[in-house]
Image (cartoon, rainbow, N blue to C red):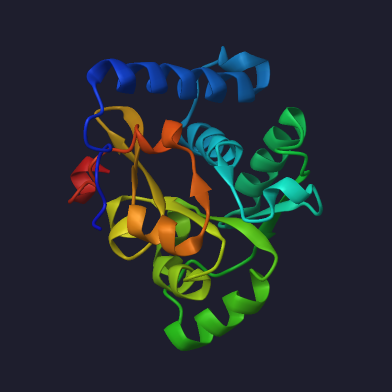
């Protein structure tokens, strides 16, 4: 199934209610309740945290082990997300642990990169590829394919390549799109409250 908008039969009222709910959760997650002006990176981080909050993994009910969020990108983003996670506490009884993966921003050699990432991301539940590291999209997606790992990136190309959720800017607002087939293949259960808000994947950098 290709990246899409919302499930068939979703009404405008349902979308509006779900949008309000997710927005409220995002603002509550941010320091100070989200009252200050937000930059794009802060919004991305809040989205990532709420994607985790509204997802379940095959062993979610066990309550054993941390949920590791791996950040492919600048250490500052990982640090901000770590503070956000600490402020909001455990998810489904699991502590959140954010780990920065130090990688060059240049496009990697695919085969070597996939092999390295498979070992590096072995304990990750979520992988967020920051805007600065888009060149790693393909390697991250290949390294996590078929595993219970939620992949989150930036721009429509991320979901078209096989990523699960992608954030993008459109007309001054951050939205996201989803690849439902990739999510199902991973066995990660992303809540319908999230999926109902997914937009059509943008087709050009102008829309992202």
Residue furthest out toward the bottom: 111
200 to 39, vertically: above or below:
below
Question: Which residue: 43% across, 64% down?
Answer: 185
Nearer-the-camera pick, 8 or 5: 8
Nearer-the-camera pick, 24 or 116: 24
Residue furthest out toward the right: 64
175 to 36, vertically: above or below:
below
Q: Is residue 2 left or right of residue 100?
A: left
In which quadrant will I find the N terminus? bottom left
Q: Is residue 6 left or right of residue 34?
A: left
Residue 108 rendering spot, x and y as whole percentages: 46, 78
Question: Which residue: 64% across, 46% down?
Answer: 76
Residue 51 rendering spot, x and y as whole percentages: 53, 40
Residue 159 rendering spot, x and y as whole percentages: 33, 57
In which quadrant will I find the C terminus? top left
Indicate the quadrant where residue 160 lies.
Answer: bottom left
């Amino acid at each position: 199934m290709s990246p899409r908008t919302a499930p068939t039969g979703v009404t405008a009222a349902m979308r509006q209610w779900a949008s309000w709910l997710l927005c409220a959760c995002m603002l509550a997650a941010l320091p100070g309740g989200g009252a200050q002006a937000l930059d794009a990176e802060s919004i991305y981080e809040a989205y990532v945290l709420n994607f985790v909050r509204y997802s379940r993994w095959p062993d979610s009910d066990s309550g054993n082990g941390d949920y590791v969020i791996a950040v492919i990108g600048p250490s500052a983003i990982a640090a901000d997300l770590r503070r956000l996670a600490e402020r909001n506490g455990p998810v489904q009884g699991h502590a959140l642990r954010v780990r920065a993966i130090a990688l060059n921003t240049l496009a990697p050699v695919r085969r070597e990169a996939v092999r390295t990432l498979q070992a590096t991301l072995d304990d990750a539940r979520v992988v967020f590829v920051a805007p600065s590291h888009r060149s790693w999209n393909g390697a991250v997606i290949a390294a996590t394919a078929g595993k219970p790992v939620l992949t989150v990136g930036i721009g429509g190309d991320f979901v078209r390549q096989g990523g699960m959720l992608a954030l993008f800017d459109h007309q001054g607002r951050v939205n996201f799109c989803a690849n439902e087939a990739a999510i199902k293949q991973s066995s990660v259960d992303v809540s319908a409250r999230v999926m109902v808000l997914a937009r059509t994947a943008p087709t050009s950098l102008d829309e992202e």
